[in-house]
Image (tube, grey):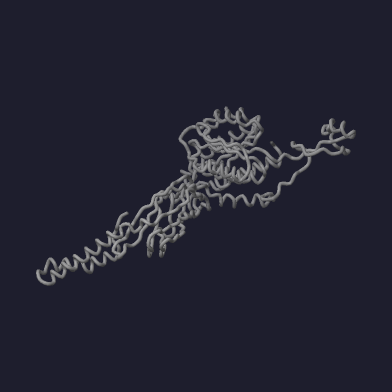
Amino acid sequence: MRLVPNIILLWVALLAVVPAVTLIVYDDGFLGWAGAVVLVVVVLLTSLDALFSRKRLDPVSIEVPELIRGSKGRELVVPITLKNVGPELSEVRYGISISQYFRIEGEVVGSVKPLGEQKLASVNYAMIPLKRGQYVLDTLHLETRSIMGFWLVRQGHKFETEVRIYPDLTVERKRLSSIFLMRGNEGSHIVRQVGKGRDFEQLREYQPGDDYVDIDWKATARRQMPVTRTYQIERTQEVYVIVDHSRLSGREIRVPVDEATEGDWLYRESAAGGDYLITSQLEKFLHCSLILASVAEKQGDLFGFVSFSDKVTQFIRGRNGKEHYNLVRDSLYTLESRQVAPDFEQLMIDLRQRLTRRALIVMLVDLSDPLTAEHFFEALPLINKQHLVLVNMVRPERAYPMFAPGTEPDELSVVYDNVAGHLQWQELRETGNRLHHLGVELGISEHEELCTDTVTQYLNVKKRQLL
C-alpha cells in the first residue's frame, strides 16, 4: 500500500499552504499567527486522512482466471472480479502490469463506480497480444480516494495467470476458402466410395464382370455360391507434419509496407529505403501446421506433429478430434528458432522406429543451403520407400530466374542481385530434380501461398489414393 497526493491536496497546497507559509515568513503579527493556524490545520487533516485511509483497500480482493487463451493481434480480454467485504468505496480504479508484448488500445486504467459493501463487480481488461508465446500476468493495481479525498490509496495484488497466445489463422483460412469452394469438400460429409480400394467393404453375390481375384473362396464354399469381396476407398490415413526450427527456419521475410497484404507480421522496421513488415519462415511453418491439422480432421485422417532441430524436440502420435488439435496447438505455439544445424539423420531414424504404418509426411524445412540439402539427401532413403514424403519451404526473397516478371532491374546494382537470385533459384531447381528422382515432391511457395499450396498437395494425395 502507498499514498500519493490527490488533486485536491495539490489545490489545498496552492490556495492555503503557500499563502500561509508566506504570511508566517513576512508577518510577525496576527496574520502570521493565522497562517500558522491554517498550516497546522492542513497538516493535521491530511495526516489524519492518511492515517485512517491507509487500509482502505484491504477489504478488496480479486479473482482472475488461472489460464487465458488468445490469438496474436486479436483482442484478449482478461476477466477480473472485485469483491469488497468492507465499507462502500465511491470509485475503485484498476490496471494490470503488462510486458512489451502487449498493447492497450482502449483505457489503460478502468474504474468501478461505486463498489458497494459486500458487493461483487465483474470487469474486463482488454489488451492486444503482439507476439505468440507463453506469458504470465502477475500484478493488478487498485486505486481509490482516501476518506477526505486528500490522498490516493494504491495497492498491488499478486496473482498468477498463464496467458497462451496462439498464431492467428484468420488470413490463412480466408485464402483456403476458395480452394474448398471449388472442390466442394469443406465441411461436407465424407461419402463412402465403394470400389477398388484398400479397406474391405462387404461380401456380396458374384456378378458378371467381377474380377476373379476378388472372389472369397471360403465364403463361396460356405454358401455354395460364388461370393465376391468389395472394397471401399481408404479414408483414414496418417498425416504427419514435421517442422524444422533450426537456424534456417529463422530466415526473415521482408515485405515493403505498401506491397504487404493483411497477415500475421512480427514487427515493423523502418530504414532509409522505406518501411518493411517482417515475419519469419518459422511463423509460416507453424501456421501451415495448424491449418493442415484442421483440414486433416475434416477429412477424417489422423494428424501427427513432429518438431526437430539438432534433435527431435516433440513427437505427437497421429490422432483425430478437437482435443487432439488443441494438444498440437499447445505443443507448437512456444516454438522458437534455434541457432543450430538440423540433424536429419537422427530425425529419419526416429521416424523409421516410431512410424510402422505407411503415412504421408509433410516436411516443412528450408533446403536453400546446399550443405543442408546434401545432408537431407543422405538421410532421406531411410524413410522415403516406406512413406510418402512431401517437402515444402518458403521461396527466398530473390530466388527467381533472370528476367522473370516483376524482377526487371531499375539500376545496375539490382542486376547483380538478380544474378545472385538466379543462381539460388537454379540450385533449388536442381534440389527439386534430385528429390523427384527419389519420389519426393519439393514445393517452393511464396510466403502467403505456403498454406494453400501444402493443403492442395495433401488433397491431391487423398484424391489420387497415393498412400
Q: Position of residue 380 (x, y in %)?
A: 60, 30
Task: Name the residue nearer the viewer: 62 or 231.
Answer: 62
Task: Name the residue nearer the viewer: 336 or 155.
Answer: 155
Q: Is residue 226 left or right of residue 407?
A: right
Looking at the image, can residue 151 be seen? yes
Name the residue furthest left: 28
Q: Is residue 100 above or below residue 388?
A: below
Q: Position of residue 138 (x, y in %)?
A: 41, 48
Q: Is residue 385 above or below residue 192?
A: above
Q: Quadrant of the N terminus?
A: bottom left
Task: Name the residue nearer the viewer: 236 or 90.
Answer: 90
Q: Is residue 137 above or below residue 57?
A: above
Q: Position of residue 270 (x, y in %)?
A: 42, 50
* Residue at point 49%, 42% (across, down): 334
Q: How many numbered discs? A: 0
Task: Name the residue nearer the viewer: 237 or 157.
Answer: 157
Asked which quadrant contains residue 83, the reply is bottom left
Q: Position of residue 121 (x, y in %)?
A: 45, 60
Looking at the image, can residue 374 be seen? no
Asked which quadrant contains residue 196, the reply is top right
Q: Quadrant of the C terminus?
A: top right
Name the residue furthest bottom: 30
* Residue at point 61%, 33% (across, down): 435
